[in-house]
Image: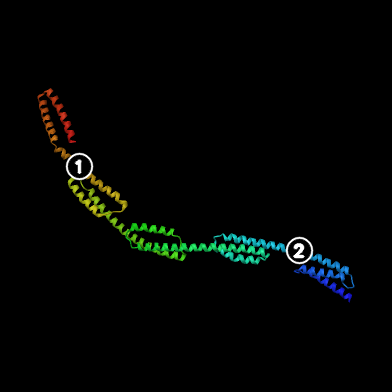
Amino acid sequence: HFQRRYDDLNAEIVLLERRLTLGGVDPAGIAGSARRLLDSLAEAAVVGDLDALRVRLEAVLARTEERRIMLAAERAERASRIAAAKEELVAEAERLGRSSEWKTAGERFRTLAEEFRAVGSLDKRTDSALWRRLTGAREEFTRRRTAHFAALDTQRTHSRERKEAISAEAESLVDSTDWAGTTVRYRTLLADWKSAGRAAKDVDDALWNRFREVQDVFFSRRNAANAERDAELQENQVQKEQVLAEATALDPAGTERSLRRLRKLQDRWDQIGRVPRESTGALERQMAAIGDKLRDAADARWEQRSIAASPFVTRLRESVAKLEAKLARAQAAGSSPEIAETEAALATQRAWLAQAEN
């Protein structure tokens, strides 16, 4: 009986020794069993070498302590790695919480929580504190994103209403024939469009197509009208060049007749209408120069006639004629004093006549 009891103790110790060689075994359980057996040796009713059993049990306890210390170090190192990984995830979450990259950050937040759980667990207090920081950053991001898109929706609604009003006004102008004024207004509407901001993409594209099509219709009409007007102006230029050629051929010597003809040509000129802007100045200057030339010639002839009809000039001419006759008689008589006196008087009268005629 006593020998069998000894063998039982030995078998239990062997089992403890074997368990120590296995991985994943709790050393605290082995140590508890070893202490229980060690305490029982003092009163064990057995036949055998109890000291040898005691030495082996003490060796088991020493090895379990080493194992406990090693496992504690491993757990501490693992907890440190988990804490560092979770701190890194939380720090990333807090950075994302301040981000305005709504799509990218939102997608990343969905994976952060999964990664946080997959890293492993810490003590409840530390784990809860880190989790609250992560979820708090996510909630802050969600709040900011919600506010951003609410403001964006408000802005897009305002932009849509403004662009609808711009498109409606553009449509009301499409049949206008006030080409210059409407062109300026369309430019203003385009500037208003650009400053109105963007509506939702599909709405914005539809409104832009509506606005652009209206402008295309108006400017096509304007271009057609301008082409018709340009053709008319070109024809007017041809007609004015013909009038100018007739005016250039007028004879300045036939003053009164030429002036009457010029007035008729000027009436035709005015009735023809406008010519292309780049030709207007040159044509008008040429026509004005012809008028000036004919009027200057008429003024010169009128002045000559006025001088010729002057009583003063008539008397001076009569005086010169008398003095010339008197000089001829004095020269025939050979009267030197009378010749000298008459020549002096004649020179004076001729000088006065020349001044009067000029």
Instruction: Judge by depth and name the residue closer to the eye, 121 or 196.
Output: 121
Instruction: Judge by depth and name the residue closer to the eye, 28 or 258.
Output: 28
Residue 17 seen by the camera: no
Count neighbours of disc 1 (C-alpha within 10 A) and say few if under 14, some if 14 to 19, many if 20 or more. few
Establish if 336 lies above or below 258: above
The image quarter in which residue 164 lies: bottom left
Mark 1: which amino acid?
A: Asp
* Residue beneath the point at 68% across and 62% down: 81
Mark 1 or mark 2, earlier in chain:
2
Residue to which mark 1 is pinned = 299
Residue to which mark 2 is pinned = 70
Left or right: where 99 falls relative to 17: left
Q: Distance between the residues labelled 1 and 2?
A: 132 Å
Residue 185 seen by the camera: yes
Left or right: where 296 falls relative to 52: left
Q: Residue 37 in the image: x percent, y percent?
A: 83, 70
* Residue beneath the point at 18% across and 49% down: 260
Mark 2: which amino acid?
A: Met
Left or right: where 66 falls relative to 203: right
Q: Residue 316 in the image: x percent, y percent?
A: 13, 33
Q: In which quarter of the image is the N terminus?
A: bottom right
Secondary structure type for disc 1? helix
Q: Quadrant of the C terminus?
A: top left
Q: Residue 222 in the image: x percent, y percent?
A: 34, 60
- Frontmost of labels 1 and 2 is 2
